[in-house]
Image: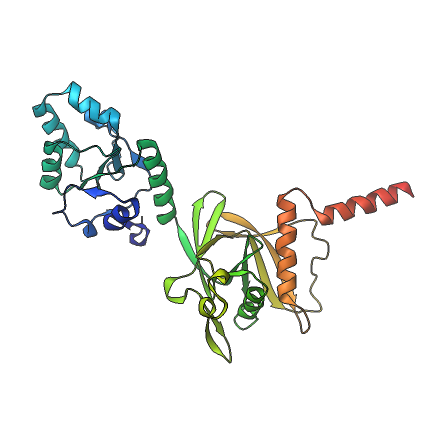
Amino acid sequence: MKEEYSVSLTKFIEKMNLKNYTPGINTDDIHIIDPDINRPALQLAGFFEHFDDTRVQICGNVEHAYLADMHTREENIEIFDKLFKYNIPCLVFCRDIEPYDFIIEAGNKHNVPVLSSSATTSSFVHETVRYLHEELAPRISVHAVLVDVFGEGVLIMGDSGIGKSEAALELIKRGHRLVADDVVEIKKISDDTLIGQSPEITRHFIELRGIGIIDVKTMFGVECVKLSQQVDLVIKLEEWDKDANYDRLGLTDNHVEFLGTKVVSHSIPIRPGRNLAIIVESAAVNHRQKKMGYNAAQEMYNRVTRGLGGN
């Protein structure tokens, strides 16, 4: 996995509000590269075949009780010495369980942080997997504008200077929210979910040719910006071509693919006098209607068919 798809253990500790029992270990140098977790029950019993040593290791009441009842202290020391030799990213105890002294000693010996959380084991596992899958998701950057329109994430694409930023500015004035301008980072967090966000350096800014940089958050207020948004619809702006055959019914959807996931796409021809903001709003609402089971184009087609059948 690429280096940019990693999470430093320091960031993970801060995010999950963990207590560190091995403060002498530099957690900045330790990185998590696997979004899944492992509960080392079999490893505590001495079975290390197919051990997922790149994952965060999590222990709860069951593992803690097993250590107390099933092994002598010498056997436990041997087990954890073998476990930590695999150079796992960290070991986390849930429910405020305090790790035994020999576990902390083994962690310091092998440079493996020993941590604890006040959360229940199941909730900590769920939140850890959700957070790591989002942080370690595959991603790409595209030249586009991403706007939240009526709750739908609309990715506006097109050649430079065609009017993407101007359309976004008009949408912001109409009460919608800017996510990213010029560069959009798209992450695939599941098989059918793409999340878009702005690079930190350009966050909340819009570039307007002839004017310069505009700070949307300062000019229009915090209610007009958003940190991230699911990508639901793609609007492609293109120069008007009188000889082109544009879709006028919309019975079939076109798609564009990002990271192996298809997103519904519409091509909008640009010519003087067209109000892009209203067109984008209409496209977003129409897309939302389709997701809720109503297709206006199909309804019109059915009416025409019934009319012809009656005649």
Residue 75 higher or lower than 295, as above or below: above
Q: Is residue 217 left or right of residue 27?
A: right
For the residue pair 200 and 97, the one nearer the viewer reads as 97
How far from the left and from the top, in percent, is residue 39? 27, 31
Residue 97 higher or lower than 306, as above or below: above
Residue 224 higher or lower than 262, as above or below: below
**Colour mapping used in the image:** rainbow
How far from the left and from the top, in percent, is residue 143? 48, 64
Q: Quadrant of the C terminus?
A: top right
Among all residues in the image, which is located at the extreme right? 311
Residue 83 higher or lower than 276, as above or below: above
Q: Is residue 284 left or right of residue 296?
A: left
How far from the left and from the top, in percent, is residue 193? 48, 46
Does residue 46 show up?
no
Q: Is residue 47 left or right of residue 300?
A: left
Q: Is residue 284 left or right of residue 66?
A: right
Residue that appears at 48% across and 53% down: 229
Does residue 3 show up?
yes
**Residue 171 occupies quadrant:** bottom right
Residue that appears at 55% across and 60% down: 176
How far from the left and from the top, in percent, is residue 59? 24, 31
Among all residues in the image, which is located at the extreme top? 70
For the residue pair 226 and 276, the one nearer the viewer reads as 226
Among all residues in the image, which is located at the extreme bottom? 210
**Residue 4 occupies quadrant:** bottom left
State how many labels appear. Answer: 0
Residue that appears at 14% across and 46% down: 23
For the residue pair 115 and 279, the one nearer the viewer reads as 115
Among all residues in the image, which is located at the extreme left? 74
